[in-house]
Amino acid sequence: MNPNAAEFARRIEHTCLAPEATSERIDQLCDEAVEYGFHGVCVNPIHVRRAAERLARACAGAGDGNAPIVISVAGFPLGACRTETKADEARRAMEDGAFEIDMVALIGAILDGDSSAVRRDIEAVAHAVHGAERPGLLKVILETAVLSDERIIMGCRACAEGEADFVKTSTGLHPAGGARVEHVRLLRRHASPIRVKAAGGIRDAAAAMAMIDAGADRIGTSSGVAIIQSLEAIGPTMVDQSADQS
């Protein structure tokens, strides 16, 4: 792998959140993350322990600080569960071996303009994640495709006040759609210094690089292998241009 494609791979969270994911698919996801050097794998809570053990075996003795990690979710994909349920789901996933949690915000409360409820929900999960025996990072999914710019900005403010580490565009499962470049730019502008994760419908190298250029720090996608293989075929020039603009 050329060095530039390898650097790009470190931004990718190799994702399988499908309800029909089998143990074999989770193993494959982990093996691909190791082979291509992705930041980590993003899986549903029930698969965290298996993924953590698979990655630990694959990277044993490697001494590589860039070994892939496990990311999981809380309140996924609707966000419409009790706050204590989200916090407990996040805590258990951390105990099982997750390093990062992507929670779904209270989307209805964002649309209502109830920033206090959104902040309290985020704050409770942040406490569970940051207060774990091995503290991790919290990303908050706003489902930006269903929000106005005003509500996206409000969501960014709630993330900052709730002590999130990242704000994230989408679950990738909402019928309104996934990540959009203009929303990534908006998140970057109003959430900074909180980092930005773009996810939802990012299936090729051009789309991934557009999100990075717009300000995304991470890319969540189930098409990571195809993206990196495409970058390898393109060569370093196009990847260099994206890195220079990010």
Image: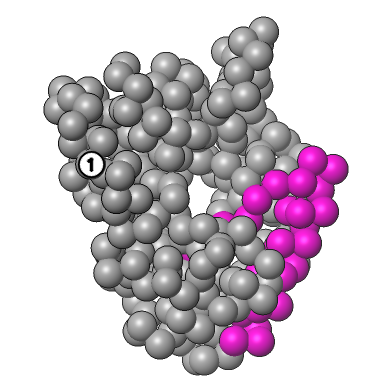
Indicate left or right for 213 with 124 as reference. left
Quadrant showing the N terminus: top left
Q: What residue span does the magenta drawing correspond to?
A: 115-141
For this orientation, the residue located farthest to the front is: 244
**Residue 121 percent location from the top left of the image:** 67, 73
Residue shown at the point (63%, 63%) measured from the top left: 164
Residue shown at the point (65%, 51%) measured from the top left: 137
**Residue 226 percent location from the top left of the image:** 24, 30
| Residue 100 inside the magenta-drawn segment | no
For label 1, the residue is 241
**162, above or below 32, in the image:** below
Q: Quadrant of residue 67?
A: top right
Instruction: Sort mark 1 into few (<14), some (14-19) or many (20+) by Cα contacts within 10 Å.
Output: few
Residue shown at the point (66%, 40%) measured from the top left: 99
Task: Judge by depth and name the residue closer to the eye, 124 or 19.
Answer: 124
For this orientation, the residue located farthest to the top is: 61
Q: Is residue 174 visible?
A: no
**Residue 142 percent location from the top left of the image:** 47, 70
Residue type indicated by callout 1: Gln
Indicate left or right for 84 with 25 as reference. right
Task: Judge by depth and name the residue closer to the eye, 80 or 178.
Answer: 178
For this orientation, the residue located farthest to the bottom is: 113
* Callout 1: SS: helix
| Residue 131 inside the magenta-drawn segment | yes
Q: Is residue 69 visible?
A: yes
Q: Quadrant of residue 206?
A: top left
Q: Quadrant of residue 131?
A: bottom right
**Residue 75 percent location from the top left of the image:** 58, 61
Task: Judge by depth and name the residue closer to the eye, 91 or 215.
Answer: 215
**131, above or below 78, in the image:** above
